[in-house]
Amino acid sequence: MDEGLRSELSKQGIFTTKMEELYNWGRKNSVWPLQFGLACCAIEMIATTMARYDLARFGAEVFRPSPRQADLMIVAGTVTKKMAPQVVRLYNQMPEPKYVIAMGACAISGGPFKQGYNVLKGIDRYIPVDVHIPGCPPRPEALIHAFMTLQRKIDEQSLTGPDRARHLCPETPSEFPIPQFGEHDLVPPSNPQVWTPPRGATAASGQ
Amino acid sequence: MDPAEHNYLFLTVFLIVAIAFPLLPLALARLWAIKFAPPKPGDQKNATYECGLESKGDAAIQFKSAYYLYGILFLIFDVETLFLLPFAVAFTGLSIGAFLAMMIFLLLLAEGLAWAWMKGVLTWR
Protein backbone atom coordinates (compact mmCIF):
# COMPACT_ATOMS: atom_id res chain seq x y z
CA MET A 1 0.00 0.00 0.00
CA ASP A 2 1.21 3.44 -0.91
CA GLU A 3 2.60 5.30 2.08
CA GLY A 4 1.03 8.61 0.99
CA LEU A 5 -2.43 7.09 0.63
CA ARG A 6 -2.02 5.49 3.97
CA SER A 7 -1.18 8.72 5.73
CA GLU A 8 -4.05 10.42 3.87
CA LEU A 9 -6.45 7.74 5.10
CA SER A 10 -5.20 7.98 8.66
CA LYS A 11 -5.89 11.71 8.59
CA GLN A 12 -9.48 10.85 7.74
CA GLY A 13 -9.63 8.48 10.69
CA ILE A 14 -9.24 5.27 8.69
CA PHE A 15 -6.65 2.92 10.07
CA THR A 16 -4.96 0.64 7.60
CA THR A 17 -2.46 -2.07 8.39
CA LYS A 18 -0.71 -5.03 6.88
CA MET A 19 -0.98 -8.63 8.02
CA GLU A 20 2.73 -8.52 8.77
CA GLU A 21 2.45 -5.44 10.96
CA LEU A 22 -0.55 -6.84 12.80
CA TYR A 23 1.29 -10.10 13.39
CA ASN A 24 4.41 -8.39 14.64
CA TRP A 25 2.42 -5.96 16.76
CA GLY A 26 0.75 -8.88 18.49
CA ARG A 27 3.99 -10.76 18.86
CA LYS A 28 6.08 -7.95 20.24
CA ASN A 29 3.52 -7.06 22.87
CA SER A 30 3.09 -10.58 24.20
CA VAL A 31 6.62 -11.85 24.60
CA TRP A 32 6.54 -14.34 27.43
CA PRO A 33 9.93 -14.92 29.03
CA LEU A 34 11.09 -18.19 30.46
CA GLN A 35 11.21 -18.16 34.24
CA PHE A 36 14.82 -18.93 34.50
CA GLY A 37 17.62 -17.27 36.44
CA LEU A 38 21.21 -18.37 36.80
CA ALA A 39 22.90 -15.94 39.17
CA CYS A 40 22.72 -12.45 40.66
CA CYS A 41 21.41 -10.93 37.39
CA ALA A 42 18.26 -12.92 38.03
CA ILE A 43 17.58 -10.70 41.05
CA GLU A 44 17.61 -7.66 38.77
CA MET A 45 15.39 -9.54 36.35
CA ILE A 46 12.94 -10.27 39.16
CA ALA A 47 13.06 -6.61 40.20
CA THR A 48 12.25 -5.64 36.61
CA THR A 49 9.07 -7.68 36.68
CA MET A 50 7.92 -6.29 40.01
CA ALA A 51 5.81 -3.20 40.64
CA ARG A 52 8.53 -0.56 40.60
CA TYR A 53 9.90 -1.29 37.13
CA ASP A 54 6.87 -3.24 35.92
CA LEU A 55 7.82 -5.21 32.84
CA ALA A 56 4.10 -5.89 32.46
CA ARG A 57 3.83 -2.55 30.68
CA PHE A 58 5.57 -4.25 27.76
CA GLY A 59 3.38 -7.32 27.80
CA ALA A 60 6.05 -9.54 29.30
CA GLU A 61 4.87 -10.08 32.84
CA VAL A 62 3.94 -13.70 32.28
CA PHE A 63 7.10 -15.60 33.17
CA ARG A 64 6.46 -19.15 32.08
CA PRO A 65 7.80 -22.04 34.15
CA SER A 66 7.90 -24.27 31.09
CA PRO A 67 9.96 -23.72 27.93
CA ARG A 68 6.99 -24.93 25.88
CA GLN A 69 5.09 -21.75 26.68
CA ALA A 70 7.92 -19.25 26.49
CA ASP A 71 9.02 -16.97 23.65
CA LEU A 72 12.02 -15.35 25.24
CA MET A 73 14.93 -16.74 27.18
CA ILE A 74 16.63 -14.19 29.41
CA VAL A 75 19.99 -15.74 30.24
CA ALA A 76 20.44 -13.89 33.51
CA GLY A 77 23.77 -14.65 35.06
CA THR A 78 26.94 -16.70 34.91
CA VAL A 79 26.62 -19.73 32.69
CA THR A 80 28.85 -22.41 34.12
CA LYS A 81 30.05 -25.19 31.89
CA LYS A 82 27.94 -27.56 33.93
CA MET A 83 24.83 -25.48 33.26
CA ALA A 84 25.44 -24.75 29.58
CA PRO A 85 23.99 -28.03 28.22
CA GLN A 86 20.82 -27.47 30.23
CA VAL A 87 20.49 -23.90 28.93
CA VAL A 88 20.88 -25.09 25.34
CA ARG A 89 18.40 -27.92 25.89
CA LEU A 90 15.85 -25.50 27.34
CA TYR A 91 16.36 -23.23 24.36
CA ASN A 92 15.82 -26.19 22.03
CA GLN A 93 12.59 -27.03 23.78
CA MET A 94 11.12 -23.58 23.29
CA PRO A 95 8.70 -23.29 20.39
CA GLU A 96 9.40 -20.96 17.49
CA PRO A 97 9.58 -18.00 17.29
CA LYS A 98 12.08 -17.72 20.13
CA TYR A 99 14.45 -15.01 21.21
CA VAL A 100 17.35 -14.75 23.61
CA ILE A 101 18.52 -11.83 25.73
CA ALA A 102 21.96 -12.37 27.24
CA MET A 103 21.82 -10.34 30.43
CA GLY A 104 24.92 -9.19 32.18
CA ALA A 105 28.66 -9.38 31.68
CA CYS A 106 28.78 -13.09 32.54
CA ALA A 107 26.14 -14.17 30.08
CA ILE A 108 27.67 -12.21 27.23
CA SER A 109 31.34 -12.95 27.85
CA GLY A 110 32.04 -14.70 31.12
CA GLY A 111 32.41 -11.35 32.85
CA PRO A 112 34.54 -11.20 35.99
CA PHE A 113 34.71 -15.00 36.00
CA LYS A 114 36.05 -15.21 32.46
CA GLN A 115 39.32 -16.71 33.66
CA GLY A 116 37.49 -19.37 35.64
CA TYR A 117 38.00 -22.94 34.49
CA ASN A 118 34.29 -23.69 34.81
CA VAL A 119 32.70 -20.60 33.29
CA LEU A 120 31.37 -20.43 29.77
CA LYS A 121 32.67 -17.33 28.03
CA GLY A 122 29.33 -16.18 26.71
CA ILE A 123 26.15 -18.12 25.95
CA ASP A 124 26.30 -16.83 22.37
CA ARG A 125 28.81 -19.61 21.73
CA TYR A 126 25.95 -22.08 21.62
CA ILE A 127 22.68 -20.29 20.93
CA PRO A 128 21.86 -17.24 18.79
CA VAL A 129 21.55 -14.22 21.07
CA ASP A 130 19.34 -11.37 19.91
CA VAL A 131 20.21 -8.70 22.46
CA HIS A 132 23.30 -8.43 24.66
CA ILE A 133 23.20 -6.33 27.83
CA PRO A 134 26.48 -5.37 29.46
CA GLY A 135 26.62 -4.56 33.16
CA CYS A 136 27.39 -6.35 36.37
CA PRO A 137 24.54 -6.67 37.02
CA PRO A 138 22.63 -4.48 34.56
CA ARG A 139 20.03 -2.27 36.18
CA PRO A 140 16.36 -3.02 35.52
CA GLU A 141 16.30 -0.03 33.18
CA ALA A 142 18.95 -1.75 31.09
CA LEU A 143 16.84 -4.90 30.87
CA ILE A 144 13.83 -2.82 29.88
CA HIS A 145 15.96 -1.13 27.24
CA ALA A 146 17.06 -4.52 25.95
CA PHE A 147 13.46 -5.61 25.92
CA MET A 148 12.43 -2.57 23.90
CA THR A 149 15.31 -3.26 21.52
CA LEU A 150 14.00 -6.79 21.09
CA GLN A 151 10.52 -5.42 20.47
CA ARG A 152 11.90 -3.18 17.74
CA LYS A 153 13.68 -6.16 16.26
CA ILE A 154 10.50 -8.23 16.26
CA ASP A 155 8.61 -5.34 14.72
CA GLU A 156 11.04 -5.17 11.80
CA GLN A 157 10.91 -8.86 10.98
CA SER A 158 9.15 -9.68 7.75
CA LEU A 159 6.84 -12.59 7.09
CA THR A 160 7.88 -13.36 3.54
CA GLY A 161 10.82 -12.83 1.26
CA PRO A 162 14.45 -13.94 1.49
CA ASP A 163 15.11 -11.84 4.63
CA ARG A 164 12.14 -13.15 6.55
CA ALA A 165 12.35 -13.98 10.22
CA ARG A 166 14.60 -16.88 11.12
CA HIS A 167 11.81 -19.10 12.43
CA LEU A 168 9.85 -18.79 9.18
CA CYS A 169 12.57 -20.36 7.04
CA PRO A 170 12.02 -24.11 6.84
CA GLU A 171 15.73 -24.86 6.52
CA THR A 172 17.05 -22.97 9.56
CA PRO A 173 17.35 -25.27 12.55
CA SER A 174 15.15 -24.98 15.60
CA GLU A 175 17.41 -27.14 17.72
CA PHE A 176 21.06 -26.44 18.32
CA PRO A 177 23.64 -29.08 19.24
CA ILE A 178 23.96 -29.57 22.98
CA PRO A 179 27.58 -29.54 24.20
CA GLN A 180 28.85 -32.60 26.01
CA PHE A 181 31.38 -32.83 28.83
CA GLY A 182 34.74 -33.71 27.33
CA GLU A 183 38.00 -34.52 28.99
CA HIS A 184 38.96 -30.91 29.65
CA ASP A 185 36.18 -28.72 28.33
CA LEU A 186 32.77 -28.77 26.74
CA VAL A 187 32.77 -30.51 23.37
CA PRO A 188 32.43 -28.69 21.04
CA PRO A 189 33.79 -25.52 22.71
CA SER A 190 31.44 -23.46 20.54
CA ASN A 191 28.82 -23.88 17.85
CA PRO A 192 30.36 -22.64 14.56
CA GLN A 193 26.85 -22.05 13.17
CA VAL A 194 26.20 -19.23 15.60
CA TRP A 195 29.62 -18.12 16.81
CA THR A 196 33.00 -17.57 15.24
CA PRO A 197 36.05 -16.50 17.24
CA PRO A 198 36.75 -12.79 16.89
CA ARG A 199 39.40 -12.01 14.33
CA GLY A 200 42.90 -11.72 15.71
CA ALA A 201 42.13 -13.96 18.64
CA THR A 202 44.87 -16.41 19.46
CA ALA A 203 44.24 -20.00 20.36
CA ALA A 204 45.02 -19.29 23.99
CA SER A 205 42.57 -16.42 24.49
CA GLY A 206 39.85 -17.96 22.36
CA GLN A 207 39.41 -21.00 24.56
CA MET B 1 -41.04 -16.95 9.62
CA ASP B 2 -43.07 -16.92 12.76
CA PRO B 3 -40.83 -17.38 15.80
CA ALA B 4 -43.65 -19.04 17.69
CA GLU B 5 -43.73 -21.90 15.19
CA HIS B 6 -39.95 -22.45 15.42
CA ASN B 7 -39.39 -22.71 19.11
CA TYR B 8 -36.18 -24.64 18.70
CA LEU B 9 -34.67 -22.66 15.84
CA PHE B 10 -32.63 -20.57 18.23
CA LEU B 11 -31.13 -23.76 19.64
CA THR B 12 -29.90 -24.71 16.18
CA VAL B 13 -28.39 -21.26 15.68
CA PHE B 14 -26.85 -21.46 19.12
CA LEU B 15 -25.36 -24.87 18.33
CA ILE B 16 -23.85 -23.68 15.05
CA VAL B 17 -22.31 -20.61 16.70
CA ALA B 18 -21.06 -22.70 19.60
CA ILE B 19 -19.29 -25.09 17.23
CA ALA B 20 -17.94 -22.37 14.94
CA PHE B 21 -16.64 -20.18 17.76
CA PRO B 22 -13.88 -22.52 18.93
CA LEU B 23 -13.22 -24.14 15.55
CA LEU B 24 -12.68 -20.91 13.63
CA PRO B 25 -9.62 -19.67 15.57
CA LEU B 26 -8.15 -23.17 15.51
CA ALA B 27 -8.64 -23.37 11.75
CA LEU B 28 -7.15 -19.90 11.26
CA ALA B 29 -4.13 -20.85 13.37
CA ARG B 30 -3.74 -24.01 11.30
CA LEU B 31 -3.95 -22.06 8.06
CA TRP B 32 -1.39 -19.59 9.37
CA ALA B 33 0.95 -22.43 10.25
CA ILE B 34 0.60 -23.95 6.78
CA LYS B 35 1.10 -20.63 5.01
CA PHE B 36 3.89 -19.10 7.09
CA ALA B 37 5.32 -21.07 9.97
CA PRO B 38 7.07 -24.32 9.09
CA PRO B 39 6.89 -26.92 11.86
CA LYS B 40 10.27 -27.81 13.26
CA PRO B 41 9.91 -30.81 15.51
CA GLY B 42 12.94 -32.53 16.95
CA ASP B 43 13.99 -35.09 19.52
CA GLN B 44 14.72 -32.53 22.20
CA LYS B 45 11.77 -30.35 21.37
CA ASN B 46 9.40 -33.29 21.61
CA ALA B 47 10.98 -34.69 24.76
CA THR B 48 8.52 -35.27 27.57
CA TYR B 49 10.63 -33.84 30.36
CA GLU B 50 11.08 -30.09 30.16
CA CYS B 51 13.47 -29.27 32.97
CA GLY B 52 16.64 -28.92 30.94
CA LEU B 53 17.87 -32.30 32.08
CA GLU B 54 17.68 -35.50 30.14
CA SER B 55 15.30 -38.04 31.58
CA LYS B 56 16.88 -41.31 32.56
CA GLY B 57 15.26 -44.72 32.79
CA ASP B 58 11.60 -45.57 32.61
CA ALA B 59 8.86 -43.39 34.05
CA ALA B 60 6.67 -46.43 34.79
CA ILE B 61 8.58 -47.63 37.83
CA GLN B 62 6.95 -50.04 40.29
CA PHE B 63 6.80 -49.81 44.04
CA LYS B 64 6.89 -52.89 46.25
CA SER B 65 3.45 -54.01 47.34
CA ALA B 66 4.98 -55.25 50.62
CA TYR B 67 4.60 -51.76 52.03
CA TYR B 68 0.83 -52.11 51.72
CA LEU B 69 0.63 -54.78 54.46
CA TYR B 70 3.06 -52.84 56.62
CA GLY B 71 0.92 -49.75 56.20
CA ILE B 72 -2.27 -51.58 57.17
CA LEU B 73 -0.61 -52.93 60.32
CA PHE B 74 0.48 -49.43 61.24
CA LEU B 75 -3.03 -48.11 60.64
CA ILE B 76 -4.58 -50.76 62.92
CA PHE B 77 -2.29 -49.91 65.82
CA ASP B 78 -2.67 -46.23 65.13
CA VAL B 79 -6.41 -46.59 65.58
CA GLU B 80 -5.85 -48.78 68.62
CA THR B 81 -4.22 -45.87 70.45
CA LEU B 82 -7.48 -43.98 70.01
CA PHE B 83 -9.19 -46.67 72.08
CA LEU B 84 -6.30 -47.04 74.54
CA LEU B 85 -6.39 -43.40 75.64
CA PRO B 86 -10.01 -43.39 76.97
CA PHE B 87 -9.36 -46.85 78.35
CA ALA B 88 -6.42 -45.55 80.38
CA VAL B 89 -8.35 -42.46 81.55
CA ALA B 90 -11.35 -44.49 82.73
CA PHE B 91 -9.26 -47.41 83.96
CA THR B 92 -9.97 -47.05 87.71
CA GLY B 93 -13.74 -46.85 87.25
CA LEU B 94 -14.12 -49.81 84.90
CA SER B 95 -16.14 -52.91 85.67
CA ILE B 96 -14.47 -56.31 85.37
CA GLY B 97 -16.51 -57.05 82.22
CA ALA B 98 -15.33 -53.92 80.42
CA PHE B 99 -11.76 -54.64 81.45
CA LEU B 100 -12.00 -58.17 80.06
CA ALA B 101 -13.53 -56.92 76.81
CA MET B 102 -10.67 -54.47 76.37
CA MET B 103 -8.09 -57.14 77.13
CA ILE B 104 -9.63 -59.46 74.51
CA PHE B 105 -9.52 -56.60 72.00
CA LEU B 106 -5.84 -55.99 72.72
CA LEU B 107 -5.14 -59.72 72.58
CA LEU B 108 -6.77 -60.00 69.16
CA LEU B 109 -4.64 -57.18 67.84
CA ALA B 110 -1.47 -58.60 69.36
CA GLU B 111 -2.36 -61.96 67.87
CA GLY B 112 -2.73 -60.35 64.45
CA LEU B 113 0.65 -58.70 64.86
CA ALA B 114 2.25 -62.00 65.87
CA TRP B 115 0.70 -63.68 62.85
CA ALA B 116 1.96 -60.97 60.48
CA TRP B 117 5.38 -61.18 62.12
CA MET B 118 5.51 -64.93 61.57
CA LYS B 119 4.47 -64.41 57.96
CA GLY B 120 7.48 -62.12 57.56
CA VAL B 121 5.53 -58.95 56.81
CA LEU B 122 7.76 -56.90 59.10
CA THR B 123 10.91 -57.99 57.31
CA TRP B 124 11.71 -55.68 54.42
CA ARG B 125 12.96 -57.62 51.45
Image (cartoon, rainbow, N blue to C red):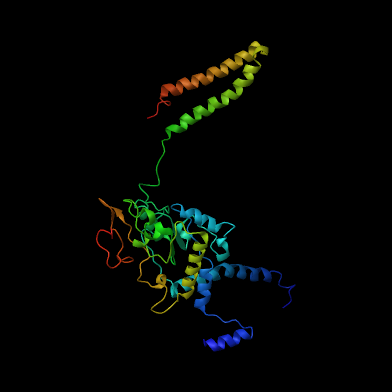
Q: Nearer the viewer, residue A164 or A109?
A: A109
What residue is at 47 percent from the left and 75 percent from the top? Answer: A156
Where does the image place residue A18, in percent across and percent down from the top left?
Answer: 52, 80
Q: Nearer the viewer, residue B102 or A156?
A: A156
Q: Is residue A119 visible?
A: yes
Give the tally of numbered discs. Answer: 0
Q: Nearer the viewer, residue A168 or B122?
A: A168
Q: Is residue A153 above or below residue B103?
A: below
Where does the image place residue A158, in percent across and percent down from the top left?
Answer: 45, 76
In which quarter of the view is residue B37 placed? bottom left
Q: Is residue B31 left or right of residue A177?
A: right
Q: Is residue B78 above or below residue A98?
A: above
Q: Is residue A51 left or right of residue B36?
A: right
Q: Is residue A94 above or below residue A164?
A: above
What residue is at 51 percent from the left and 73 percent from the top? Answer: A23
Q: Is residue B46 visible?
A: no
What residue is at 61 percent from the left and 22 percent from the top? Answer: B83
Where does the image place residue A62, in percent across and percent down from the top left?
Answer: 54, 59
